């Protein structure tokens, strides 16, 4: 057995933290899935009222637990609100916990955005990057945390022998204090004395964070006895032992780092997170982020028509889809439970999300297609022997549209390119013109529409004037090295315009030109939470904006009038 390094001080400050250890269960009986959480939080609320030694409780860094609990106990809203505002019940910053390396950067941004907004309904969120499930450090996270006002990260990642306190430098150069969770989240049968003895030699700050799972796996009296044992641990160790919370520990680490800068570590470049996701989960995210959001934002910024088929002001519906998607990302719970999500139930939820996003996208595209000036195509002739198609490309790269296999014996047209997050319109000629062929084409296109794996969306249109060109993109980017992460509506339904986010994926600065389909009078630089920073870009006469993108720096813009 390797001997431990010598202690660096005579006494330490121990932040002993109780954390909810509940697995979110999904089954065919959703009303029963939340019962373990309800029983636990019922007890926690009672302890806050009756046990003065029970000072703080952490909801595992996620806000969804409060939504689950209040769905059964809505009468407790004001009590929970008071506890959150008093800093006793710690909620957020995430909506759900996950392993950050297994999901996309954009989903991490949405996870924090929704989690912090949900927590703020009750009071100040826990602004600590609490990541007990992180298997690796995602290079983009330091700047993301900073942008959301989070100044300290907590994660289990540490090479043996390294100090617990370090500075984490992200891929864009942003730095944030990082404190390691030396032995993760332990059960109550793990001795405070033993855990302190193992971790203290590696603490330069003199502060130690000891996380404990608090759930119903042990008896109520056992848990009370553990709580009562904290003063005894203090006497034995000659340390200061507090029933504390991660925000108090993070504040101490932040003060220590300002006075004594610790060593700097950097995240290793990682493969695209999307490649590590399961295929159904990846499809669900892409259906919301690429298939739905750009086209919903596009049509929402055009004048309304009585014959429109899409949902106006769809922000709440889209946020609901994102919440449903994020629920699928929850990792294994703090302890092993037999009530994990059943695979068939999870697959069903994924398919429901894909179908809902696809249906909303289809309706937005129908309204857009009705605004395409197809009269310009008809002027070239040939429409009497065929049909007009408007084909949408819900991808960040240009796509080639050719006749689908299901239609190859019915229609023909020249292969064309569709711009990213855009459409093109074309005349498709019938191979053998007839009423029967027309019916078969419509039936085949309906089948394509219901195929969630189809990369393109085909819409049949009539001949009419419209404000949209025969081919266009909601937002074009001048350089392939600038990744457009999202094109979406602002989160608040009373705000107009579109939000555009992206970053330079290379290692050298790039001059970027973003060009929307129309000119907006104002382009603001905003935070990831879409709050104005005070920065603005000057649109050119065609609506384009130019800026210099530093490597890996995430940039978010709000185009509006």
Image (spheres, grey):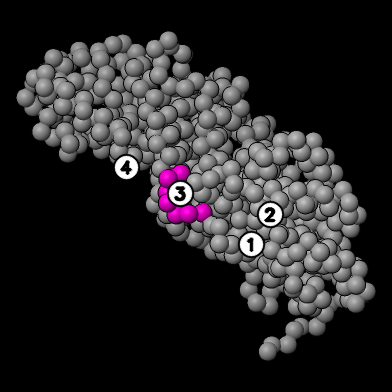
**Could you tell which of marks 1 and 3 lies nearer the N-terminus?**
1
On the picture, is 187 further left or further right than 368? right
Label 4 or label 3, whichever lies nearer to me, is 3
Q: Quadrant of residue 523?
A: top right
Look at mark 3 in the image and give the residue it sits on.
345
Q: Secondary structure at mark 4?
A: loop
- Please give the range of residues in magenta: 341-350
For marks 1 and 2, give the CA distance. Answer: 9 Å
Please name whichever residue, 462 or 50, is drawn nearer the observer in this view of the structure: 50
Residue at screen point 39% across, 24% down: 363
Q: Answer above or below: position of 397 versus 190.
A: above
Category of crowding for the residue at label 4, using alpha-carbon neighbours closer than 10 angstroms: few (below 14), some (14–19), many (at least 20)? few
Q: Quadrant of residue 383?
A: top left
**Could you tell which of marks 1 and 2 lies nearer the N-terminus?**
2
Query: In the image, which disc is placed on residue 453?
Result: 4
The furthest residue to the left: 432
Q: Secondary structure at mark 2?
A: loop
Q: Please report contact status of discs 1 and 2: CB closer than 8 Å, yes or no.
A: yes
x, y percent for residue 534: 68, 31
Look at mark 2 in the image and give the residue it sits on.
60
Look at mark 1 in the image and give the residue it sits on.
334
């Amino acid at each position: 057995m390797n001997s431990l390094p010598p202690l660096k001080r005579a006494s330490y400050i121990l932040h002993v933290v109780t954390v909810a250890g509940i697995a979110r269960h999904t089954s065919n009986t959703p009303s029963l899935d939340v019962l373990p959480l309800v029983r636990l939080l019922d007890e926690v609320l009672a302890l806050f009222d009756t046990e003065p030694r029970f000072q703080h409780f952490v909801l595992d860094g996620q806000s969804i637990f409060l939504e689950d609990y209040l769905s059964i106990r809505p009468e407790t809203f004001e009590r929970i609100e008071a506890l959150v505002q008093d800093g006793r019940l710690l909620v957020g910053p995430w909506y759900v916990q996950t392993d950050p390396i297994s999901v996309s950067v954009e989903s991490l941004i949405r996870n924090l955005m929704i989690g912090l907004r949900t927590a703020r309904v009750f009071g100040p969120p826990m602004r600590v990057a609490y990541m007990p499930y992180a298997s690796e450090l995602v290079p983009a996270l330091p700047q993301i945390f900073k942008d959301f006002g989070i100044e300290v990260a907590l994660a289990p990642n540490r090479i043996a022998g390294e100090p617990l306190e370090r500075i984490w430098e992200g891929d864009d150069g942003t730095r944030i204090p990082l404190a390691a969770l030396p032995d993760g989240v332990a059960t109550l049968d793990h001795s405070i004395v033993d855990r302190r003895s193992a971790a203290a030699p590696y603490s330069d700050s003199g502060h130690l964070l000891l996380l404990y799972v608090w759930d119903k796996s042990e008896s109520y009296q056992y848990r009370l006895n553990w709580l009562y044992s904290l003063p005894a641990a203090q006497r034995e160790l000659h340390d200061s032992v507090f029933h504390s919370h991660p925000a108090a520990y993070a504040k101490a680490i932040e003060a220590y780092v300002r006075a004594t800068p610790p060593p700097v570590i950097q995240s290793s470049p990682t493969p695209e997170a999307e490649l590590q996701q399961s295929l159904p989960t990846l499809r669900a995210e892409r259906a919301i982020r690429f298939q739905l959001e750009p086209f919903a934002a596009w049509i929402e910024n055009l004048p309304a028509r009585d014959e429109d088929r899409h949902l106006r002001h769809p922000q709440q519906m889209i946020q609901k889809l994102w919440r449903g998607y994020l629920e699928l990302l929850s990792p294994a719970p703090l302890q092993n439970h037999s009530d994990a999500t059943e695979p068939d139930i999870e697959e069903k939820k994924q398919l429901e999300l894909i179908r809902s996003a696809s249906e909303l996208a289809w309706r937005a595209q129908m309204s857009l297609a009705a605004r395409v000036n197809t009269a310009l195509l008809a002027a070239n002739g040939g429409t009497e022997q065929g049909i007009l198609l408007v084909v949408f490309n819900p991808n960040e790269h240009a796509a080639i549209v050719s006749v689908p296999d299901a239609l190859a014996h019915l229609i023909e047209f020249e292969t064309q390119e569709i711009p990213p997050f855009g459409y093109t319109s074309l005349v498709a000629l019938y191979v053998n013109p007839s009423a029967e062929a027309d019916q078969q084409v419509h039936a085949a296109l309906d089948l394509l529409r219901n195929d969630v794996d189809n990369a393109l969306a085909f819409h049949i249109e009539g001949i009419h004037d419209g404000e949209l060109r025969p081919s266009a993109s909601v937002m074009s980017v001048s350089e392939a090295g600038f990744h457009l992460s999202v094109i979406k509506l602002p989160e608040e339904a009373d705000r107009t315009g579109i939000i555009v986010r992206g970053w330079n994926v290379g290692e050298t600065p790039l001059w970027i030109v973003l060009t929307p389909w129309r000119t907006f009078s104002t382009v603001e630089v905003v935070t990831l939470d879409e709050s104005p920073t005070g920065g603005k870009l000057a649109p050119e006469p065609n609506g384009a904006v130019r800026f210099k993108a530093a490597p890996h720096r995430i940039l978010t813009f709000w185009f509006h009038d």
